[in-house]
Amino acid sequence: MAQKVNLIYKLEGEFEDGIDVKEISPVLLALGELIQEGNTILNPSGRELSVKVKPFKEGSFEVDIFVFALNNYRQIIDAISQDGVRDVKELLEWIGIIIGGTVTGTVSLVKLMQFLKGKPSKTDKIERNKIQVFDSEGNSVITDTKVYALFSSPTIQQNVYNVIYKPSNIPNFKEITTSLKDQEESKNTITKEDAKDFEAYATPVEVDGAEIINESTAVYFLKPKQGSYEGNKGPYSFRIPGSNDTLSKVTILDEDFANKLERGEIRLHKTDTIKAEVHMVQKKIHDRFTPPQYEILRVVSYEKPNINQEELFNDEKEED
C-alpha cells in the first residue's frame, strides 16, 4: 500500500471572478513535476512518487504525494515504517516548499534561487556536503550539495519559475503559501515581491562546477510515453521499443518537428514510432551525478498507425 503526504498549495488574493484554468493548470503541472524530478535527482534508486492535485476551495489545492516501493523488500519495510513519508518531507524541505528541520545552517533551493536572481558568479566547495555560492555582487550563501544538485537541473529551475513566478502575474495575486496539511509550523510564504526575484529563471541558467562524464549521440527508434501539455519542445519521455529502457526529460531540438507539435499538426500517441538522432549528456557536479539529459537533434522519420486519434498520449491516462 502506498504511503501518502498531504501538501497544501494556496494562492492568496482577491479573486472575485475566480482564476482562469489556463493560468493555474500549468502551475499545478509544474508543481507535480518539480516534486517528481526532485525525487529522481536526490533519490535516484529510491521510491517512486505519484502526485495528484485536487482543489478544495478557490485558489487552494491539496497535493497528494503517493510513495511507491520499487521492490517487495522495500514494500515490507515501508509497511512497518514511515521512511517514505520522511524522505518526501525532507525533499520538500530541500526544495523549500515547506519549512522544517532538514535545512539547518544552509539555504533551500528556493532561497538559493531567490538570493542569486540568476547565474552564480562562482562556487567553492568548503566541506564534504557544503558549497559556498556567490552572486554577481560577490555576496555568498552556503548550501548543501543536494540543493546545488537540484539547482543544476534546468528542469528544476523551469518548474520553480512556473510554480512561483507565473502565479504572481495573475490579477490581484498577493502571495503563495505552502504547508503540510494540519501542520501550520511547516508553512512557507512567497509574496508577490519575493516572486519577482525568480523572473531571471524564465530561461534556465548555467551552473559552475559541472563536469561532463558521459556524452554520446546515436539513432534510436522511440515510442512516446509522456509529453508537454502545451505541445512545445518538451520535456518529453519516450520508450525504446523492444526493451525496458526509457529516455526521460527529452528536449526536441528539431525545429520543424517541434513546430508541428506546437501547432497541433502532430499529436503524439503511444503507438507512434519515431526514428531520431538523440544526444545524451550526463554530468557530475561537486561529486554528485546528475540524471542524463537527452536532446532529439533530428527526427529521421515519424510513423503513425491507422488508429483512433482521440486518445492522445498522457501517462496519467495510460498504463505503463
Image: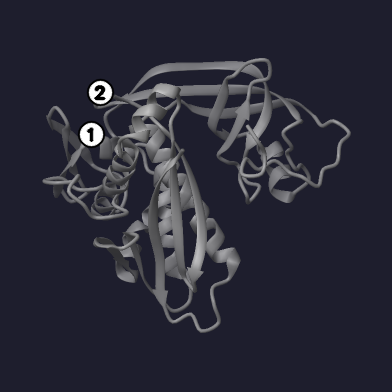
- Residue 128: x percent and y percent? 14, 27
Left or right: where 244 falls relative to 85: right
Determine whether label 2 and label 1 are within 8 Å by CB: yes
Looking at numbered disc 1 in the image, what kind of residue is underneath it?
A: Thr
Q: 177 or 197: nearer the eye?
A: 177
The answer to whether one can see residue 252 in this image is no
Determine which residue is flagged by label 1. 145
Looking at numbered disc 2 in the image, what kind of residue is underneath it?
A: Asp
Q: Residues within 10 Å of mark 2 (few under 14, many from 20)?
A: some
Q: Quadrant of residue 91?
A: top left
Mark 1 falls on what kind of element?
Answer: helix
Q: Residue furthest right?
A: 306
Q: Residue furthest front?
A: 80
Q: Residue at position x 73%, y 44% from top?
A: 312
Q: Residue furthest bottom?
A: 16
Q: How many numbered marks, from 0 up?
A: 2
- Residue 248: x percent and y percent? 53, 31
Left or right: where 233 falls relative to 308: left
What label sits on residue 216 in the rendered view?
Answer: none
Q: 139 or 305: nearer the eye?
A: 305
Q: Looking at the image, is mark 2 or mark 1 earlier in the sequence? A: 1
Determine which residue is flagged by label 2. 287
Q: Residues within 10 Å of mark 1 (few under 14, many from 20)?
A: many
Spatial CA span between label 2 and label 1: 8 Å
Q: Is residue 266 above or below residue 241?
A: below
Q: Residue at position x 27%, y 48% from top?
A: 93
